[in-house]
Amino acid sequence: MSSTTQYTRNILVIVVAGFILIILPHFIGDYYIHMATMILLYGYLGLAWNILGGYAGQFSFGHAAFFGVGAFTSTLLQLNIGVNPWIGMFLAGIAGMLLGLFIGALCFRYGLRGPYFALAMLALAEMLRLLAVQWMTVKYPLGINIPINTDSFWNFQFDKKAPYYYIMLFMTAAALYLTHIIEVKRIGSYFKAIRENEAAAESLGINLFKYKLLAMAISSFLTAMGGTFYAQYYLIVDEEAAFGVNGSIEILLGPIIGGAGTVFGPVLGAGVLECLSEVTRDVFEGYGGVHLMVYGVILVITIIFLPEGILGGLQLIFRKLKKRGRRH
Amino acid sequence: MTIPGIPLLLQAIVNGILMGGVYGLIAVGLTLIFGVMNIINFAHGAFMMLGMYATYWLYVLLGIDPYLSLLLTIPLLFIVGLLIERFLIAQVLDAPGHNQLLLTLGISLFIENFAICLWSPNFRTLEIPYLQNVVNIGTVMISIPKVIAFLSAIIFTALLYYFLKKTDMGKAIRAASEEKEGALTVGINLKKIYYVAFGIGAACVGAAGTVIAPFFYVNPHVGGIFVIVAFVVVVLGGMGNFIGAFFAGLIIGLAESVGAAFVPGQVKQFIIYFIFILVLLFKPEGLFGRSNE
């Protein structure tokens, strides 16, 4: 297949998929719109994680740190000095990015890698959670409520679910596009070189510190903006939802299961997980942690049988088929 | 920040040392697994939780004394660890480190949430009449179960040390952790070493869970508190360094307890995470180096 026809085909797929996703809320009820919004949100957060974890190979077990900082930043700015949530979302991104640059500079400067970097990030998120607990038990023991405002785009508050869905659809599409750009540009090759072999990347003249930090900055900025969306969607922020370990785990599960270091993997993974968790909730009604139990099983199975995730596994099969095709 | 009086400080030091011994025992299991297999076991806390529940149910349902239940919890956790290594961990020994960590994370997610389904997320406590006493030495109150836990931790660590130094199996484990290829050439079955070491690591933390159960609450997520402490202790003691881990346990126990006397509330745990990041950044080889001697 020539590259022009492949290009046309890709554009066609994107247009059709986009069209379906845009008209979707007119055909499904609130329950499914909510589910679709959650798939998009975790897809989006997974895409953000994926830039640092999947492309640059720095696995973070504490992305809830950025998510929580985002949720708290926009909410507190809105409550205390009346900052509009859209501006708050941008400032949240900046706050998350500053935190990312700070911890990233420390970790990468001192060469923390692999599991050690993952655990340092986990510790960071837990530290923030404990600070939030300490501060909130005095001031907001029941969580911070965002006052209900009139339904308008400017207020980032809507009576219906569909507008939230469209906002998240736009954010996910933007994150996908950004990932696509990283994938095709030189920066993506730098990230992947660092992921595959740091020493080799460095000997080729890639500035490890700079590019790891760049990946961290993009990733933390996007994740924190997702935190603002979460706060505006539920209109309540509490320390467990913002900084909890489960949040960090749910962010990274999508890309791991869908395929870390691929463009569509994180969204695919988020979709698979969300559907699974809905099914298990229905089947095992009344058992609290059952969807996390299923996540555990899925994670174990993925790591053992599909270490590159679903998309990574499919790519491997396609490559093998192609090779075989060429041989004949 | 408040400045505590001398009695309070003494109390904090005593509590810190007693708790530190238990941290040491938890970390000894983790560092053994790391030293031999180079794997960070995220499910270590879940194993400890299983040990605690085993002790709890044996007491509540069958009336078995918590310390007597060690005879059951240690073999039970050994088998759990052995099976998990044999069927799951063994599959990823050549995988990148973060994938190994993700696998043990998945195992711990499963075990902890399975425990919630089975036993509900409620907090439970063991109330054993003869353990409610405290002994007063001067102004310092010493709780009996904490002393027993501390002494058991020392005994188990010493037994394990003896096992590693004197028995053939122990020597093989040490050989495997120091020089894999050498161990293979002299005919050591590495696969067997791996599951035995993993089983022993799980048994250690199971024993720690049992001796903690009489004075700590039991809950499916209780392991999460200890697993991070154990990571700190293991790194501080020098990854894979057995004796280092025990002494690092004492240091962290003291730091946590004395720190809590100065600053209130959740800060106690905060200090542990803070130390963890500092050690990872500035002293990743630990205080006592990485050797196994």
Image: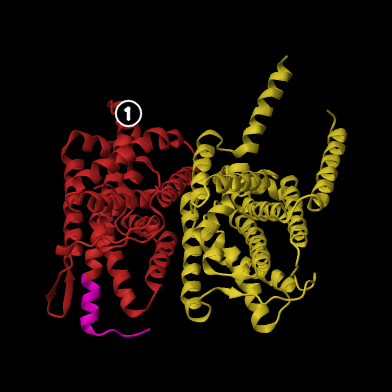
Chain colours: A yellow, B red
Residue under numbered circle 1 = B184
Q: Quick check: is B10 in the magenta stretch?
A: yes
Tell me the chain of label 1. B
Please give the name of the residue rendered at 50% of the width and 73% of the height, measured from the top-left corner. Answer: A132
Crowd tier of the residue under label 1, counting other residues whose Cα lies within 10 Å: few below 14, some 14–19, many 20 or above: few
Q: Quick check: is B280 in the magenta stretch?
A: no
Q: Is residue B133 visible?
A: yes
Of A243 and A202, which appears nearest the observer?
A243
Please give the name of the residue rendered at 56% of the width and 61% of the height, measured from the top-left corner. Answer: A64
Q: Is residue A315 above or below residue A268?
A: above
Of B270 and A97, which appears nearest the observer?
B270
Q: How many marks?
A: 1
Range of residues picked out in magenta? B1-14
Q: Is residue B240 visible?
A: no
Q: Is residue B191 above or below residue A54?
A: above
Q: Give the structural element (helix, strand or loop) at label 1.
A: helix
Quarter that holds the N terminus of chain B = bottom left
Looking at the image, residue A318 sits to the left or right of residue B78; the answer is right
Magenta segment's dominant SS is: helix
Looking at the image, residue A7 sits to the left or right of residue A209; the answer is right
Please give the name of the residue rendered at 52% of the width and 39% of the height, measured from the top-left corner. Answer: A303
Looking at the image, residue B170 sits to the left or right of residue A272; the answer is left
Estimate the x, y position of residue A138 in percent, counting from the top left: 48, 81
